[in-house]
Amino acid sequence: MAHAAARRFAAALAALARRPALAATLPTALTAHGPLLAGAAALAADPDDFFRDRVEDPGALRVRVVLLQEAPDRPGSAAPAARELAYAHSTPLSELTAPGAGPLETAAELLALTDFATAYLAVATTERPWTE
């Protein structure tokens, strides 16, 4: 359920909030997307990039890891490793856990949380994606 919700969340972020997003399952995401965190940390280390156009460029996008879980950490879960990787690169981390009684409740809770976050981000940005 969490992976399906993550894929939908990434698609909604791209379509509605006009923000790039990737979805991957753990532990595969640690090796597949770990280098992105390292690159983002390197870019964040130099906020006064000499070549950045300060008039035309509103600033670099900041990376955030959103960890969707169906239940709190279970033994053998890769979630602690994901947290450590994010924190090692000074990347903000948000965790959404939906310990529903069944698969339907879990899916509904994860989808509701991610839909709300997408709508909030779309409204909070200065660009209005729905006007185009």
Image (spheres, grey):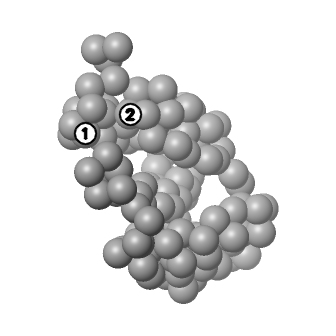
Above or below 8: residue 35: below
Residue 47 location (% of width, % of height) = 36, 74
Residue 76 location (% of width, % of height) = 73, 75
Above or below 61: residue 106: above
Work out how far the residue at label 1 is from the one at label 2, CA to CA, in angstroms.
8 Å
Earlier-in-chain disc, 1 versus 2? 2
Name the residue furthest top.
132
Crowd band around label 1 with a 10 angstrom C-alpha radius: few (<14), some (14–19), many (20+) = few
Of 117 and 71, nearer the camera is: 117
Which amino acid type is marked by label 2?
A: Ala
Q: In which quarter of the image is the N terminus?
A: top right
Apparent side of residue 94 relative to residue 37 in the rendered image (left or right): left
Residue under the point 61% across and 76% down:
38
Crowd band around label 2 with a 10 angstrom C-alpha radius: few (<14), some (14–19), many (20+) = many
Residue under the point 25% across and 39% down:
125
Residue under the point 43% across and 34% down:
18
Name the residue furthest bottom.
88
Of 41 and 94, nearer the camera is: 41
Q: Are marks 1 and 2 in contact (CB under 8 Å)?
A: yes
Secondary structure at numbered mark 1? loop
Which residue is tagged 2?
Answer: 17
Residue 16 location (% of width, % of height) = 41, 27
Above or below 131: residue 76: below
Which residue is tagged 1?
Answer: 125
Residue 77 location (% of width, % of height) = 68, 71
Which amino acid type is marked by label 1?
A: Thr
Secondary structure at numbered mark 2? loop
